[in-house]
Image (cartoon, rainbow, N blue to C red):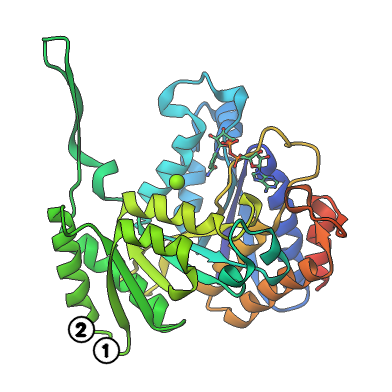
Amino acid sequence: ASNTLFLLPGDGIGTEIMAEVEKLITHLNASGATDFAYDKGLVGGCAYDAHGAAISEADMEKALAADAVIFGAVGGPKWDAVPYEVRPEAGLLRLRKDLGLFANLRPAICYAALADASSLKKELVEGLDILIVRELTGGVYFGEPKEITDLGNGQKRAVDTQVYESYEIDRIARVAFDLAMTRGKKVHSADKKNVMKSGVLWDEVVKQAAKDYPEIALTHILADNAAMQLVRNPKQFDVMVTDNLFGDILSDAAAMLTGSLGMLPSASLGAPDPETGKRKALYEPVHGSAPDIAGQGVANPIAMFASFAMALRYSFGLVDLATRLETAISDVLEDGLRTGDIMQTGCRKVGTSEMGDAIIAK
Ligand code: NAI
Ligand code: MG
């Protein structure tokens, strides 16, 4: 088949929520809507138990060959003491690095049925649909030097270095503009150019790239003001592009405007292949392996389904099917079905597989 998926369920609830997406894939293939060929591998603690590595070389090759990697979650107390290089998270970091995933897409969508549950006023979040585009492979988390030195006088000095080259800014800006062209054609670029040289360059390169997108309304915003505005009036935003550090913080804040960790999808994209134009991509829920509820069949599979909807849209151009899946999620919530993490009075509590079945049926 031309469309290949590589599923990496991982640990804890990762396997439980991936089982629901597998049901969906089987259903879509059987109905003729898709022709996915898919394979499954091990990542995280389960891969360490099987191979002594957080992901095997054979599975890395399959991930590199696939059109899209669908990732569950990794980690758990069982592996808290394993050596640092083979800890569960190392599997995800290796995938990000080898697939060159520099663009992290974090939507914050407010489902109408859950608007009441937001910590903000209902009218501020109802209908909210923001996409934060975070640079994922550069900036202060990776810049050198990165060290703690002993100053010898009882004092120490810690150094992290924020480094951005213009090509890194240009390519993430273009991802944001391309996405904005399929949405509201509005982009906010957040940096701290008032106090950081990397912010000055960020703003310069983003504005230069924007010249190729005359239809986009580009607005500069200082990152601290962006945090304030996200909480004050989030609906003013459509797409927001920002660096690794600010994006980490702003995307977590934006996500929480709308509800539970169990609802939040993400996508990470690489550069387009020069021949095919296809980007390497990994789709995963924002949450972790939730050891506290693992194995009980109660995990919310919606973040996993919503991540799969992003795969349909961004890796396979199946925009209508992606929208139908997102509508199915919304409809099931309207019907009053809830997993424990999003339970509200008057709603019906269901487990992972009943929620999955209901979404697939829609
Ligand atoms: P977590 O996201 O696994 O859980 C935080 C809380 O949210 C828990 O109470 C959990 O039960 C709940 N929760 C999360 N997802 C849920 C879902 N789908 N349905 C219902 N409830 C849900 O974060 P935590 O507890 O900090 O980490 C647990 C493990 O996961 C650790 O080993 C951590 O390293 C790992 N982790 C892995 C990530 C990944 O694979 N990308 C991301 C974050 C954490
Ligand atoms: Mg974070």
Name the image quarter holding residue 223.
bottom left
Comparing 2 with 79, the one in front is: 79
The residue lying at 77 percent from left, 73 percent from top is 331
> For the N terminus, which image quadrant?
bottom right
Q: CA distance from mark 2 to mark 1?
A: 6 Å
- Res 69 seen here: no
The residue lying at 36 percent from left, 62 percent from top is 226
Looking at the image, residue 342 lies above or below residue 161: below
> For the C terminus, which image quadrant?
bottom right
Residue kind at label 2, given as amino acid type: Lys
User: As drawn, is 360 to the left or to the right of 279?
Assistant: right
Ligand 2 within 8 Å, label 2 CB: no
Q: Position of residue 301 (x, y in %)?
A: 71, 54
Q: Position of residue 209 (x, y in %)?
A: 21, 76
Residue 211, label in figure: 2
Secondary structure under tag 2 reads loop
Whether pointer 2 and pointer 1 mark residues with C-beta atoms closer than 8 Å, the reply is yes
Looking at the image, residue 93 lies above or below residue 328: above
| Circle 1 residue | 214
